[in-house]
Amino acid sequence: MLEASTNGAGAAVEAAAAAPEGVPDPELVEQAKRRSFTAKYKARILAEADACTAPGEVGELLRREGLYTSHLTYWRKQRKDGALKELGKPRGRKPADKRDAELVALTRRAERAEAELAKARRVIEIQGNVSALLEEMLGSDSASRSTER
């Protein structure tokens, strides 16, 4: 048989085994998640709330949507300040202008070409020095041989 544990874990295992299928484990508590509302949703709810004329209609709207009056108050203030228009814009960085990206690419390409040109000039200079040195060495050898004959 099962022994009783001192920390109560055995009881939780027995309770979980006895719980029927599809029932959530009472030991696990769901983490509350903050709701976020889009600008489009806020504008729609404010339009519906402004259209309410009969007593109790705004309360009915709030209950149906699961909102509070403070939401309406804050959203009306945002609308008045023009913040809802700003909230409708996508978040993050603004996309870079294609011309800027092309300018950066062309600048990099020009820098690489200048570096390659500098390398090529150094190679040509070294080849010229080697050629002059060989000519000098061969020239002195041929001059000394011609006098020896």
Image (cartoon, rainbow, N blue to C red):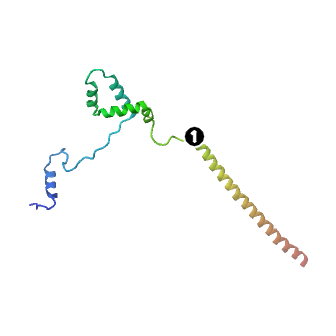
The residue at which mark 1 appears reads as 98
Describe the element under mark 1 as helix, strand or loop: helix
* Left or right: 136 as drawn, with respect to 14: right
Which residue lies at the image location 30% right of the left edge and 32% below the top edge? 69
- Residue 10: where, in percent of width, then height? 14, 58
Residue visible at 13% across and 56% down in the picture? 11
**Residue 44 versus residue 140 in the image, above or below:** above
- Please, which residue is most extreme toward the top here? 54
Amino acid at the residue labelled 1: Lys
Q: Quadrant of residue 79?
A: top left
Q: Which residue is drawn at the image coordinates 31% and 34% (left, top)?
A: 70
Residue 131 in sight in this render: yes
Which image quadrant is residue 76 in?
A: top left
Image vertical order of residue 93 relative to residue 88, above or below? below
Nearer-the-camera pick, 119 or 24: 24
Q: What crowding class fits label 1: few (fewer than 14 Cα within 10 Å), some (14-19), or many (20 or more)?
A: few
